[in-house]
Image (cartoon, grey):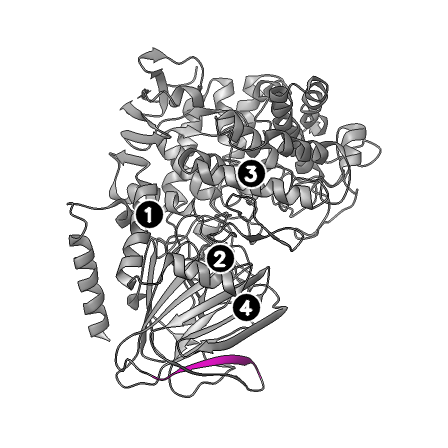
Amino acid sequence: MKKYFFFFFLFLVLFTDSRGQSGKQLTDYVNPLLGTATLWKPEDLGYVRTWKERTWGAEVFPGSSVPNAMVQLSPVTQFRSGAGYQYEDTVIYGFSHTNKGHWNLLHIPLLPVTGPVVPGNYCSKYSHENESARPGYYQVFLEKYGINAELTSTLRCAYHKYTFPRDADKKLLADMTRSNNRVLAWKIQKIDEHTFAGFQQAEGRMYFYAVSNDGVEDIVNIRDDKHEVSLVTFRNDKKNEPLELKIGFSFVSIENAKMNLEKEMIGKSFAQVCKEANDTWENLLSKIIVSGGTEREKGIFYSCLYRSFLWPALRSDVNGDYMDARDNVANGGFRYYTDPSFWDDYRNKLVLLGMISPDVAVDIIKSITDKGEKRGGYMPTFFHGDHASAFVAGTYLRGLKDFDLERAYQLLLKNATVPGRGGRPYLNEYMNRGWIAEKDTTNVPTWDEYKAAVTKTVEYAYDDYATALISKELGDKENYKMLMKRSGNYKNLFDPVTGFWRGRIDNGNWIRDFDPYYPYFAYMYREANAWQSLFFAPHDPQGMIALYPGPEAVEKKLDSLFSEPWRGYEAHNMTGFIGNYCHGNQPDHSVPYTYYFIGKQEKAQCVLDSIMNRFYDMGAEKLAYAGMDDAGEMSAWYVFNAIGLYTYSPADPEYIVSVPLFDKIRFSLGDRTFTITKKGAGKKIIGVTYGGKKIKGWFISHNLLKEGRELIIEAGTLLKSK
């Protein structure tokens, strides 16, 4: 086994020497294993575990991918478990080819094997001591079979390299009946002496076309009383040389999978593909260069930046073909992508995507527009809410205009004004009275499904505002006026007696069984309690503050949020607490900035610094996030706050300024580069200038940043409150 790691070490040395530069590359700071571990201890979780089920982790994958690719080539240690990989697991079932980190996908899991195979018990033990990962590369030693597995990838193709024991027979196990989704159909067949192909239908039909350096002898299906697998055997033409598989993928056809393979990978060595993947990541990461800070902080920063660019995933082929929402082959002349995780990443990640990969952001809008027009005229939603509106508005207002705004607007307007399947749930209620009612009941279990009426109401109000911004751009005065009026609906569920947003029943009375500490999955609040649902009106912070008797009342409420202890409630998706603030889920990620609007910016900074310091390399192995990354949202939160900017209202082309983690940041934005310089030390911002001119207030516009000047944030010591 040691010889494999000698060769791996030698490869890394040669790879490093080939850079022609001294010192670390930015990819060296990235740890794809960060976020794969689970939290177990009460001091990390915030409560004592009593359930057998593990608490949810970041749910991320450690395998190979390039930015926003079709292929995510990663190990599977559990099916039906987040990203399919849990750091605490000890066995590997195979290497799958799609991944979001969210209990779905994992198409076409493959595992190299040798000797007799038991279909119901084929997984292999592995050790983290014999595992490594970097952007575009993953390696692990499979102890059961004595095989060293190395993986790399391109946009639409996977490269598997397996070093078998000397003189061993070479086989490949394809577990075509499994993925994280229910498998509806599958096929695998030999094409010629070096090629096999097929498909697996599970959340889309993914086709593959695989070329082997060893001759394909046979493909048979074998089963026992537990399971059925397919076994590819090879002639071992290249005896005692690694088995290398180059596999092209497509969601259109086997022919297109072959075309993708020929375009992206045929004729390239493993080392070449691996280097190209690394170079692609290095180019993306170099859009933000930070200096100052510790090595730990740089490691977290670039790992988070990396993690922010793995989803949405490409679904079109090199010729532009894709399978559309009506299951027809289409070609719109753009790259077709999966839907974003709108409820999560509209808050920050999609803005970061537009800043660094504007062409991808534009094509995602073209993709969701195409889907909406073919799915009844509604813009796609995700899980909860209607936040494509913020993404479309924010992207356009930041100057990315190479898409048909009118077409996107018609879909968003229908979402906001026409009740129907595919649009906003409970829209009739919202339109008729300005809020959504909840059932009046008692003793609701955390996991019961209800309307999440409070969360929907306040978020629909923000979506109305975002859509109104587009109305204004297009000169639709009537709908602009209507939507702006509705954007104040967040006030309708504010209870001035308790100071919380609170559910109402049909007759307008408040929900009686109200405990602000109790967390719900979908009763009144979506994945939150009343504390975590405070202060969400990013389009109208002053109007939100005015609901309280005065700034002192707001300050007291915020202080209580961050100091009232979590009451020990156990929930899979709620971990990482500061008081009742929960960083392990998204609902309250913008709440700390509320301090800005009552003249207490330094208190916000204390919270932001604590979050960055505590919640991104947790646990015994320092490989756990506080909670779910949700397709990059939590990672993007760190990226923005570490550089001193945040997307408080993502639909608006501006950023709230905070004290950066690093001393200097160089950010390449389009064809210009702006810099951020931190002067002084401490939590309180005592001055902000841009290009030598003082910035009034706490926000800086995207248009100013595009000028490519220097943003200076001067920080001082914490001042005592009078």
Label 4 and label 1: CA atoms lie apart by: 28 Å
Quadrant location of residue 638?
top left
Q: Given the image, on which type of amino acid does mark 2 rest?
A: Asn
For disc 1, the marked residue is 280
Tell me the element at label 4: strand
**Which residue is located at x 42 percent, y 57 percent?**
36
**Which of the two labelled residues, at mark 4 and mark 3, occupies the earlier sequence position?**
4
Using the image as rendered, state which of residue 92 and residue 470 is in the foreground: 470
Of mark 1 and mark 3, the one earlier in the sequence is 1
Q: Residue 682 location, x and y as percent?
A: 32, 25
Q: Is residue 432 above or below residue 93?
A: above
Between disc 1 and disc 2, the foreground one is 1
Inspect the magenta stretch and tell me whether residue 472 lies in it: no
How packed mark 1 is, by other alpha carbons closer than 10 Å (few <14, some 14-19, many 20 or more), is some
Tell me, for residue 365, which label it has, or none.
3
Name the image quarter holding the N terminus. Answer: bottom left
Residue on which disc 4 sits: 199
Residue 173 in picture, x, y percent from top left = 45, 77
Q: Kindly identify which residue carries mark 2.
A: 99
Q: Which residues are magenta?
A: 226-235
Taking depth in this image into account, of 575 and 385 the one nearest to the observer is: 385
Q: Earlier in the sequence, mark 2 or mark 3?
A: 2
Q: Mark 2 or mark 4: which comes first in sequence? A: 2
Measured Cα–Cα span from mark 2 to mark 3:
21 Å
Residue under the point 36% across and 84% down: 235
